[in-house]
Image (tube, rainbow, N blue to C red):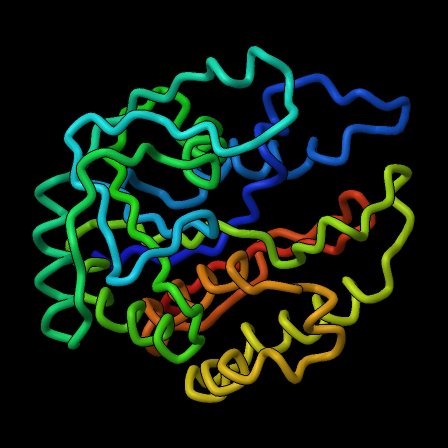
Amino acid sequence: MAPFPTLYIPHGGGPCFFMDWPYSTPNPWTRLAGWLSALDATLGRRPRAVLVVSGHWEEDPIALNVQAHPPLLYDYYGFPEHTYHLEYPAPGAPWLAAEVQALLGAAGFEHRSEQRRGLDHGVFVPFKLIYPQADVPLLQISLQRGLDPEAHLRIGRALVPLREREVLIVGSGMSFHNLSITSIDNARIRESELFDAWLTEAVCAPDANIRDAALMRWRSAPAARIAHPREEHLMPLLVAAGAAGSDAGTRVFSDRMLGWQISGFCFAAT
């Protein structure tokens, strides 16, 4: 049986899929919601568990949420009251945490267990659509504080063996993340298109070594610091790319929302 692919998914803005769009313009999140809802079917089979790294959790050393029944962390502000009562009672995966800790340790990464923090919205918001029955165990792992690109590729490489153990590795972020530049009427934002074109070419390079080298140099990409004034929403992509090993990257989602050109990627054996 082929190993599971790795994914980089856009997780939208806050609880965007679970509230009414307040403007007269078309809801910019509709296509992304539909893609996330159909993602399970594209995988062909259910994973034993999902290991997810979100752009909303940074620690040093790397932390893993080892709770058997993780709560939710409503880490967004100014949204309708009902969005602070969303539920997603997916089981945790303490058994998987032990495997991940062993792999990280063997690769030279310090790590710790987290017993209190809930799953943030970069996890529970998209997974409410991907696995709406909350029936797939989830283990969240943090980014490493400092957001070093090479370190996050190495974190991903340490996790490669999990794919043979029926674990789906998902990086959850946004390929363009500059909240100061938005267009309610979805007018094109040129800088987002420039960065997206570069990112797609880099991720889909036919040679994984070329891909990874390009991603490590992402700051030199066109409009890089406009696309990511701070790179926490890009680093989950590097974890997913590292965990892909030599498998090729493909763009599997593309849309314009709030003027941002946004992409999602899958890494799988061809």
In which quadrant of the rendered view does residue 19 lie? top right
The spot of residue 100 in percent (x, y) is 16, 57
Residue 244, above or below 137 = below
In which quadrant of the rendered view does residue 252 lie? bottom right
Taking depth in this image into account, of 161 and 187 the one nearest to the observer is 187
Residue 80, above or below 150 = above
Name the residue located 59 percent from the left edge and 20 percent from the top edge: 18
Q: How many marks?
A: 0
Name the residue located 14 percent from the left edge and 48 percent from the top edge: 97
Taking depth in this image into account, of 29 and 39 the one nearest to the observer is 29
In which quadrant of the rendered view does residue 203 lie? bottom right
Name the residue located 38 percent from the left edge and 64 percent from the top edge: 145
Left/right of residue 69 with respect to residue 145 in the rendered view:
left
Left/right of residue 26 with respect to residue 50 in the rendered view:
right
Name the residue located 63 percent from the left edge and 71 percent from the top edge: 199
The spot of residue 154 in percent (x, y) is 30, 76
Left/right of residue 70 with respect to residue 235 in the rendered view:
left
Residue 93, above or below 259 = above
The spot of residue 260 in percent (x, y) is 77, 52
